[in-house]
Image (cartoon, rainbow, N blue to C red):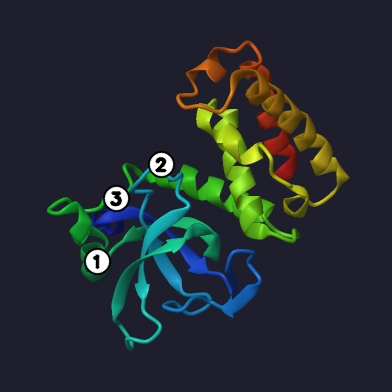
Amino acid sequence: MGDSEAEVLAWCVVANVAAHTTHGPDGVEVRRGLKHFAPGAKLWVLPPQWGDGGEKLFVVGHHRGRGTGRLARLVIDRYHLTNFRVRGIYSPAVYRELMRRWEPWGDHPLRLWETRDVAEETAQWWNRVSAGATDVDKPRKRVELLERLCFLARGDSWAWQFLVDRDLADALRDDREAAAVTPLVALVESMVADLGTDYPYDRFVRDPRWTDVIDAATKALEVLTA
């Protein structure tokens, strides 16, 4: 281990605030950067702290209105970020701000990334989602669709809900993508019609059609992120 690596306090995902961010129910309000962070600002990104798949994340960066050097830790939507990568934390101030206790959790500090490899894998996936969310009318909806496809591809039984009774046309780029998603939606809707929507969803996993759902979700995800 080299001297520079020995000085690393932890490994962390970092990202930049997108130049333009969308807000509101339909994403029609466009802003430069975010209220608290300037466009292009470098943010240190903590791993998901709760079970939303990383849709909202704790970040640390230099606050837009607090003057040079002032750090802030806030929760923001991940789709406002771009260019995810992994960097070592050398600054004690950044490390302290990342680890500062969060009042709703009492004395428990927030979690850092378990390993550098986990951070690298997550950054790669988030970049894949970001790249796959361009050139559509509803990029936020597109991100949600990509995330649900990922969950379905790994067999998470709850993720079918996003596909039922939803018009996904404005989250798709072209007929090729529609052709990849349509069979999956039809399969899920047929299962819902037979099995109902009541929780828990274990019965979906036990249904022999579930492996077809996983395969269809995997193929759709490949097409939408190609």
Determine which of the numbered discs, if any, sits on residue 112 in the image.
3
Residue 156 seen in render? no
Q: Earlier in the sequence, mark 2 or mark 1?
A: 1
What residue sits right under mark 1 in the picture?
97
Q: CA distance from mark 3 to mark 1?
A: 12 Å
Q: Secondary structure at mark 2?
A: helix
Spot occupied by residue 56 in the image (x, y as percentages of width and height): 43, 56
Number of marks: 3
Question: Mark 2 against mark 1, which lies toward the viewer?
Answer: 1
Label 2 amino acid? Val
For disc 1, the neighbor class at 10 Å (few under 14, some 14 to 19, many from 20) is: some
User: Residue most toward the left?
Assistant: 107
Disc 3 + disc 1, Cβ < 8 Å: no
Q: Quadrant of the C terminus?
A: top right
Q: Secondary structure at mark 3?
A: loop
User: Residue most toward the right?
Assistant: 175
Q: Nearer the viewer, residue 178 or 167?
A: 167
Determine which of the numbered discs, if any, sits on residue 118 in the image.
2
Q: Quadrant of residue 161 in the image?
A: top right
Label 3 amino acid? Leu
Spot occupied by residue 126 in the image (x, y as percentages of width and height): 54, 50
Label 1 amino acid? Glu
For disc 3, the neighbor class at 10 Å (few under 14, some 14 to 19, many from 20) is: some
Q: Nearer the viewer, residue 155 or 159?
A: 159
